[in-house]
Image (cartoon, rainbow, N blue to C red):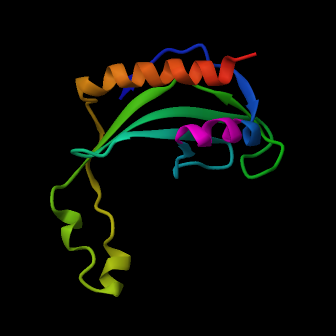
């Protein structure tokens, strides 16, 4: 994990409006959320694993599954997941086994972020600040 300080930290938004701003720019709500916290993910690359810019948020008014939830953004960070080579190559042997074995567990779900993605992440955070902090 590699943290990137940002002017968006601590800013509050209605979750629905935040989604409307971020989704067209390539962000999606990550699958690891619950009723009071979650994150927007931007997939940077899928070479040798998955590399994301993650923007965490927490609910400060309401729950994430309600229409009027307000969230507060945390510090963005880069995250790399490294997967086992070849594990997914045979996932579709049959329809039944494909439904059970379509994803492999990461070898390292908090791998060191490769240097090549740090500048990309910083640029993405600058773009994010422009999107969210515009008047």
* Residue 21 in the figure: left or right of residue 95: right
Q: Which residues are magenta?
A: 18-26
Measured from the top left, where is residue 93 in percent x and y?
Answer: 23, 82
Quarter holding the N terminus is top left
* Left or right: where 3 falls relative to 94: right
Q: Is residue 95 above or below residue 85?
A: below
> Looking at the image, which residue sits at the far left?
85
- At x 54%, y 32%, the residue is 55
Q: Relative to residue 26, is residue 85 depicted above or below?
A: below
124 vs 11, nearest the viewer: 124
**Is residue 22 inside the magenta stretch?**
yes
Coordinates of residue 30 in the picture (x, y in percent): 52, 47
Total residue callouts:
0
Q: Residue at x 79, y 41 (%)?
A: 69
**Residue at 32% across, 78% down:** 98
Q: Looking at the rendering, in which quadrant would you find the C terminus? A: top right
Q: Is residue 27 visible?
A: yes
Quadrant of residue 60 within the rendered picture: top right
**71 above or below 65?**
above
């Amino acid at each position: 994990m590699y943290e990137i300080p940002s002017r968006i930290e601590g800013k509050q938004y209605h979750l629905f409006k935040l989604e409307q701003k971020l989704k067209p720019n390539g962000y999606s709500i990550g699958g690891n959320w619950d009723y009071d916290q979650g994150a927007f993910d931007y997939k940077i690359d899928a070479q040798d694993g998955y590399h994301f810019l993650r923007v965490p948020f927490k609910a400060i008014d309401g729950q994430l599954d309600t229409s009027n939830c307000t969230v507060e953004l945390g510090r963005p960070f880069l995250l790399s997941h490294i997967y086992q080579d070849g594990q997914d190559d045979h996932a579709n042997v049959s329809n039944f086994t494909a439904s059970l074995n379509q994803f492999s567990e990461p070898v390292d779900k908090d791998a060191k972020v490769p240097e090549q993605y740090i500048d990309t992440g910083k640029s993405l955070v600058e773009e994010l600040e422009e999107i969210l902090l515009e008047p």
